[in-house]
Amino acid sequence: MGATMTANFATIGAMIGRSRNELLRVPGAAIPGVLAPTIFFLGLTAVFGNLRLLDGFGVESYASFLIPVSLMQGAGFTGAATGVNLARDIENGLFDRFLSSPAPRWVLLAGLVGAASLRSLVPGTFLFVVAMAVGAAFPGAIGLLVALIATMGMGIVAACWGVAIALKFKTQSAAPLMQAGMLTLILCTTAYAPQELLTGWLAVVAEYNPATQIVEMARQGFVGTVTWAGTWPGLVALAGFIAVLGAWALAGMRRTGD
Amino acid sequence: MLSRQTWRVIGTLGLRSAKQTFRRPQLMAPLIVFPTLLLAIQVGGAGRAVDLEGFPPVDSFLAFMLAGAMIQSTLLAGNSGGIALAVDIEMGFTDRLLAAPIPRYAMVFGRLVGTALLGLFTAFWFLAIGFVFGVQFTEGPLGIVVMIALVVASAVAFGSIGAAIALRSGSASVVQGMFPLVFVILFLSTAFFPQDLLQQPAQAIAEYNPLSFIINAVRDPVVFAFTTEDMLKALLGIAIIGALGAVLCARAMRHRLRVG
């Protein structure tokens, strides 16, 4: 049992190492995942920055308000890229070799999502530096830690989604679906304004979208103080997404192997 | 003056490019789904912006945003047309056209006809959204016709830039890589917010961005009224972008013929 678990962890480590090698050997592949959320962050701050002047907005800097959303977007794009890479591996037959290895399916999934979680730190770090440069508030050590957990957690959620879609369609052409799915999930929250200032259908959707809790959790340190009451709903939402999408991805992986 | 035969070639290639796009959902989806999604989210997320001091008097934020969504879609149509042309180059279809007894510019014009049709489609799409969600078009049917004409003309202008990049690079992934630039240009214009309420340096850049000229003129018939100045600025913006695209296309075509 001990030896099996050691082998499983070694496999997960090897898959994470493969992802790291890809990043080091083809650094250009990471650029779109960094560039897109950065453009959105800077662009939306420039465009909607004056929304902070609305009564009830309650935040001094729009960059501080928006940066958690961009961190989630960065993680979302990274996770979606995991799905695209998996689709490529399926198309060129490499994934068949993984499936024919003695590694359990959950280990393969854990390797993929673990790598995505770590890779989400690449756009996250870049975005954080950019946000600080344009005047976002420093969230403090605890705030930063909470934002980090939310970012890496969202990386796992996005990777599970991407993997499930890749296993369903088995083609890189499904990439827009992977990206659009995460973008929709993240933007249908309090991304642009606080809940009280949202209008129409978005006000209703954001209120019930569990991703809102994750965004709010990550936002705490940037716009105020981190509290347990503001943190646990986000953790629950992350756990829920990971459980549901992880189960779907695992089911897809088991089906693919049959 | 183009000969009748050249017009036929352009028409045939245009029809081909339109069919190609409408038959491939992966080419159509980004032009429609993404701008529509962003429009819906931004209207819900930033809808209270109309309460800001200095925001021009409008019926709704959707009415204000409609022009931005249309032009965003046409920018993406230009990019999409460029990708399709690059795919033609990668697959060798363009080589066959080069060997055929047709003018070289007909290849680009044919592609632009397809892009113009896409522009027309997106204009109708966003007008339909406006009607469904109760947007009042201040200038009535004439205003709508002007909006459509401006959207189609700008699609052709943006398409010429996409075609130039495709001809120069010959790579679909390079043209696709221009996708984020679409948003840089949009964010630095009046696509999503009034110029006076943009943050610096976006506000200063938006003042001289030709895209702002086009968007303002497309927006006028919905929320304000026609002004000769805005219309002339829009036509100037389209002419500048189109001329730039034509020059770049000509240079890229020469380069392609030289390197093979």
Image (spheres, rainbow, N blue to C red):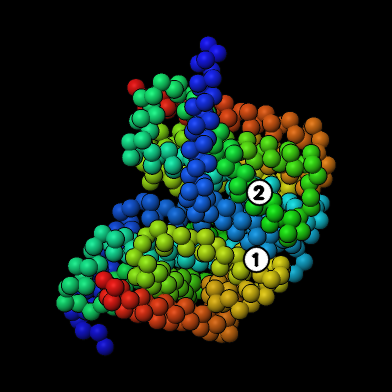
Where in the figure is residue A162, as x and y percent of width and height?
48, 38
Q: Residue at x 73, y 38 (%)?
A: A146
Which chain's residue wears label 1? B
Question: Which quarter of the picture shows residue B54?
Answer: bottom right
Q: Is residue A25 visible?
A: yes
Q: Residue at x 34, y 39 (%)?
A: A91
Q: Residue at x 36, y 75 (%)?
A: B252
Near mark 1 (Cα within 10 A), the count class, few <14, some 14-19 or many ≥20, is many
Q: Which mark is residue B193?
A: 1
Asked if B99 appears above or below B91 in the picture, the reply is: below
- How many marks overall? 2
Q: Amino acid at mark 2?
A: Thr
Residue reaching furthest bottom? B1
Where in the figure is residue A31, as x and y percent of width and height?
53, 54
Asked if B38 appears above or below B182 in the picture, the reply is: above
Residue reaching furthest top? A1
Which chain's residue wears label 2? A
Q: Nearer the viewer, residue A220 or B234?
A: A220
Q: Amino acid at mark 1?
A: Phe
Q: Nearer the viewer, residue B71 or B217?
A: B71
- Residue under label 2: A125
